[in-house]
Amino acid sequence: MAKLNIVVVSAETQYKVTIKNKISDPEIAIVGYADYTKESRLKIEGYTPDVVVCVASSPVEAEIFKFIEGMHFQKSGCSAVIVTDDVNVNMVNKAARIGVRQVIDINSTPDTFCQILREVNEYEQEIRSQLNIERRVRSKVISFFGSKGGTGKSTVAANVASALAKKGSKVLLLDFDFSFGDQNLLLDLEPKDTVVELVQDPEGIGIEKVNSIAVMHSSGVVLLAAPKSPEYAEYVSPEHVSSIIENVRPYYEYVIIDISNGFSDQSIVALENSDEIMLVGEPDILSLKEAKETVNILDQLQQKSKIKVILNKNTNGLIKAKDYEKMLDMDVYSTIGYDYSTCAKATNKGQPFVLYSTHSVVARDTMQLVERIVKDKVD
């Protein structure tokens, strides 16, 4: 059974926390938070929620009603509810006129609150069916992050992106290793422009500009390349990172991000804007130590719940998956075998090994990872 995904919109942090505490149903998930700003419109669309929960104190300001009306939620196949501290007839009628499905008392119990959300979603599904409105598939943003250099996280990211695209998904690969990104080499692509040209465009960042700069690989994956030289990395700010992700979310089924090692401001913003963080390690004691430290930092950043551990270059050495699981206190999501020859040949040819050597151990293991990613997205 697919989860009911909601986005919570409020100008007050306390209200966001209140709604989070009301989600008692494990089948209801908060996929994002937003506020009532113009920039949030695209952010909310990118989350592709089933229900948008708009929270505000009474009397609800006219600007909030205008914000909700301007989102045209029903066109994208989701519904909106308002949560407030004073539910009255005038407010209910005003909300109904702009397409809000329900006005909910903020003091309602968690069980009542979740039941209302389920009923609203069921009603919206019936309306969509009657009007033949197709539900948009929610985008998933997945970051690949190395516990240290040399784990192979860029290679894994390129192969996962290529495999997803080859399966028919619309995939964008963002090379956010701004100093030493090499996804263009792994895919044998020669982009004329990179992320630097995108962020310097005086017209701002938009999906049309992203698509005009990005280049497509033969597998179907679209790449937005890293700067051509490390000194250009400083041109890309954390705000640029956030804006790029928000702008591309609504248009791609999967957004794969290759993030540089280390916790720069840009990396942290990318991690915070990701749905999942694939933490890539390898079977040696240094990588295990770095992975532990990385998990601790991500925990401090309140990003630990997103982590999925990938043990790359897996061998029958002293450090095994169970050691990662014991040290990190979490399951290893995927293991990928070690095949230096296949990886080296694929890299030198500028081809992902999932396409170049489909029967190799690394290709087989990576495809199993991809199948799990697809299954988890559906579930």
Image (tube, rainbow, N blue to C red):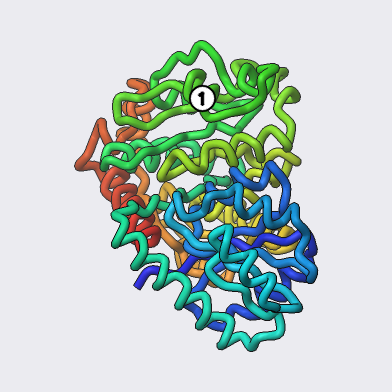
Q: Position of residue 200 (x, y in %)?
A: 69, 18
Q: Quadrant of the N terminus?
A: bottom left
Q: Residue at x 35, y 36 (%)?
A: 162
Q: Residue at x 38, y 26 (%)?
A: 347
Q: Nearer the viewer, residue 299 or 248?
A: 248
Q: Position of residue 362 (x, y in %)?
A: 32, 44
Asked which quadrant contains residue 261, the reply is: top right
Is residue 363 placed above or below 5 in the rendered structure?
A: above
Q: Position of residue 300 (x, y in %)?
A: 74, 62
Res. 324 in view: no
Image position of 342 (left or right of 113): left
Where is mark 1, residue-wise?
208
Is residue 77 placed above or below 109 in the rendered structure?
A: above
Res. 235 in view: yes
Q: How many marks?
A: 1
Q: Secondary structure at mark 1?
A: helix
Q: Nearer the viewer, residue 93 or 272?
A: 93
Image position of 341 (left or right of 359): right
Q: Residue at x 33, y 42 (%)?
A: 169
